[in-house]
Image (cartoon, rainbow, N blue to C red):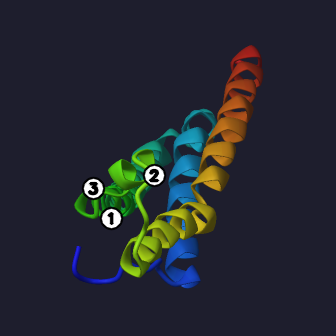
Amino acid sequence: MNRHPHTLPPLVIFFFMAIGLVSAVAFRLMTIIYAIKPTLVRPIWYIGVIGYIFFFAYRFYISEKRKNAVRDNHLLEKIQQGADLDPDDREHVAYVLSSIIKSKEHINYLSIFLLSILAIGADIILSWHH
């Protein structure tokens, strides 16, 4: 890998985290929206799907960027063999580790988990009232 990898600015990271959260909320709201105003289900669904298209395209890009840094520079092999890492190798390892640390994907995963539980609970409550 000839160019030096770098993590994206925090604003970009938070922007895509927000897109992922909005999409997660949209999907989890669908059962509630359906019970209240069924005509809004389709627009909410589009918000969720379009948001996830952008969010997962971004996540794919980040994942590939990390894998390419490791693969193109044979970092795993060098570490497994106990080889010395040159400054360029160290920069790539630092990029991968920094990218993992700066990632906000864990917030999305936790939010999706919690929102899913809430959505199931809301749907059960709403279905008892109908």
The local secondary structure at tag 3 comes to helix
Q: Which mark is residue 69?
A: 1
**119 above or below 124?**
below
**Which residue is labeled 2 in the image?**
82
The kind of residue on which mark 3 rests is Arg
The local secondary structure at tag 2 comes to: loop
Assign the C terminus to one quadrant of the image.
top right
* Mark seen at residue 71: 3
Q: Residue at x 46, y 79 (%)?
A: 8
Residue 111's place in the image compared with 118, above or below, is below
Nearer the observer, 55 or 70: 70
Q: Is residue 47 visible?
A: yes
Disc on res. 42: none
Mark 1 closeness class: few <14, some 14–19, many ≥20 residues within 10 Å = many
Crowd band around label 3 with a 10 angstrom C-alpha radius: few (<14), some (14–19), many (20+): few
**Measured from the top left, where is residue 113 in percent x and y?**
66, 36
Mark 1–mark 3 distance (CA, rounded to whole Å): 6 Å
Front residue of this view, candidates 80 and 11: 80
Q: Name which residue type carries label 2.
A: Gly
Q: In percent of the image, x 40 and y 57: which residue is there?
A: 83
Mark 1 → mark 2, Cα distance in angstroms: 18 Å
Whole-Å distance between the Cαs marked 2 and 3? 16 Å
Among numbered discs 1 and 2, the one appearing first in the sequence? 1
Would you call the spot at circle 2 few (<14 residues within 10 Å), some (14-19), or many (20 or more)? few
Dot 1: what SS? helix
Q: Nearer the viewer, mark 2 or mark 3?
A: 2
Residue 46 visible, this angle: no
Left or right: residue 81 versus residue 98 is left
Question: At 34% across and 83% down in the image, what residue appears?
Answer: 4
Q: Nearer the viewer, residue 75 or 37?
A: 75
Is mark 1 in CB contact (under 8 Å) with mark 3?
yes
